Image: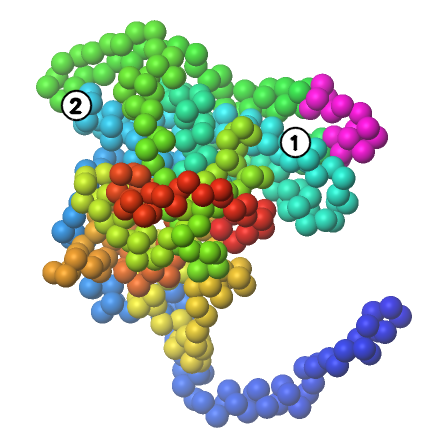
Amino acid sequence: MKTESVKTMNKVTPIDSEMLARFEQGYEARPGLQVMSNAISRTALPDAAFVPAAAAKLQMDFSVLVKTNNITNQKQSGRCWMFSTLNVLRQRVIEKCKLEDFSISPTYLAFYDKLEKANLFFENIIHFAGQELDDRETFTLMGNPLPDGGQWDMAISLIKKYGVVPSWVMPETVHSTGTAKYLPILTRKMREDALELRALVRAGKDPAARREEMLAEIYNALRILYGQPPKTFDFEYTDTDKVYHCDRGLTPKSFLEKYVGNDFDDYVVIISSPIHEINRTYCQPFMGDVVEDNMFWLNLSQEELEDLTIRQLQAGEGVMFSCDCHPDGDRANGYWDPDCFQYGEVLGGLTFHMTKAERLLTRDSTMNHCMMFCGVNLEENGTANRWKIENSWGDASGQKGYFIGSEKWFKANVYQVTVRKSLLSDAQRALLDQEPLPMKLWDPLA
């Protein structure tokens, strides 16, 4: 009865037989639609919509390239942000030690990432304990207590706090490469823990001791799933001159200082968001991993973001970036370009007109993948027409692991890059002194 009373207050539009008849008549009046239906009955929509002539323009040749190494593979995990950050940093070790190839252990960082995220979740739950469970902040937190995803700032917080190790020192496990095998179990436990922490706070009790016990349980589970993070190790390698080296008794932090460097404060994350104020800094106080750190972004125009990206590539350094990887992509052949797909034409003449801002505000677009720009092709006037991308989906995807993004795709779907502060103009650098505006937990770019 209650539902009926609501409906009587609002005019509803049911699909009736007359409406269906009009739909059928409209379809049958266009014979080409049935021909298309027949054609794609045995052809997947992306294949039917593919435009070979557009893809032919996306050559794997670039006027600006940075050195890269073997393609990495995050496998069935959401650690793209970690891999893309480490892909930028591993080049330092390769050049310093004159190595053919090298990789930094994502498993080591992932262990601490999950532990830190559990601690941050408990911190946030305690902070919002006065809310009801269906209030938006608490409801959002409960939706994903232990997320796989992340961004540059989160990776750097872990690296600065815990250091790094070579990949062979803490290798991958079946659970580090396939996080869906265990995350539903731990997230269920953490939601249960959250209810208990809320009850303690709301009863006026100190939750600190119980919180530590809960974290100890998460730690034990992570030790079982990931193994023990090393405290010391020996760094043995043979350089390109065939000379053997052995650096004994290193800790993860001493390895970081000696072989990678700790100049991360020299970098800044640039976003280009049409739904946020330009020339403003932003933070996300309730998102991240390491609870004592915060995410810090500077929102600039699309043109400025692109210019900074090009100049860092020209300086010989890759650029970690975050994007929406879902639209207009061909994972098998390694393309991202809206001109490569005619979905609307195949589906009866659909048209798409949303702006970038409208796509964000309607949740049509979000930042969902991180990769590294390792090249760009520039026109004679210095503008870009295509980008070379190092992905972390293994060398069986794309073109031996590399992808090409068109300039049109870049403008529509790239939201964030990390660049050296030295590339910023004086005016841009002055913007970093602002007090950052906090983003909401449910912000499309959070």
What is the x, y in percent for residue 301? 36, 57
Residue at x 46%, y 56% (from the top left corner): 277
Query: Which numbered circle lies on residue 284?
Result: none
Give the residue type at disc 1. Answer: Phe
Q: Report which residue position mark 2 lands on.
A: 98
In front: 387, or 59? Answer: 387
Residue at x 42%, y 55% (from the top left corner): 278
10 Å neighbourhood of mark 1: few (<14), some, or many (≥20)?
A: many
What is the x, y in percent for residue 92? 24, 28
Residue 418 to residue 325: above or below? above
Magenta stretch containing residue 264, yes or no?
no
Magenta stretch containing residue 205, yes or no?
yes
In front: 69, or 202? Answer: 202
Does any portion of residue 104 appear in the rendered image?
Answer: yes
Q: Is residue 396 left or right of residue 114?
A: left
Q: Earlier in the sequence, mark 1 or mark 2?
A: 2
Q: Which residues are magenta?
A: 195-211
Residue at x 85%, y 74% (from the top left corner): 5
Q: Report which residue position mark 1 lands on.
A: 122
The majority secondary structure of the magenta stretch comes to helix
Give the residue type at disc 2. Answer: Lys
What is the x, y in percent for residue 186? 63, 32
Among the 4 quarters of the image, the one containing residue 70: top left
Residue at x 49%, y 19% (from the top left corner): 227
Residue 23 to residue 124: above or below? below
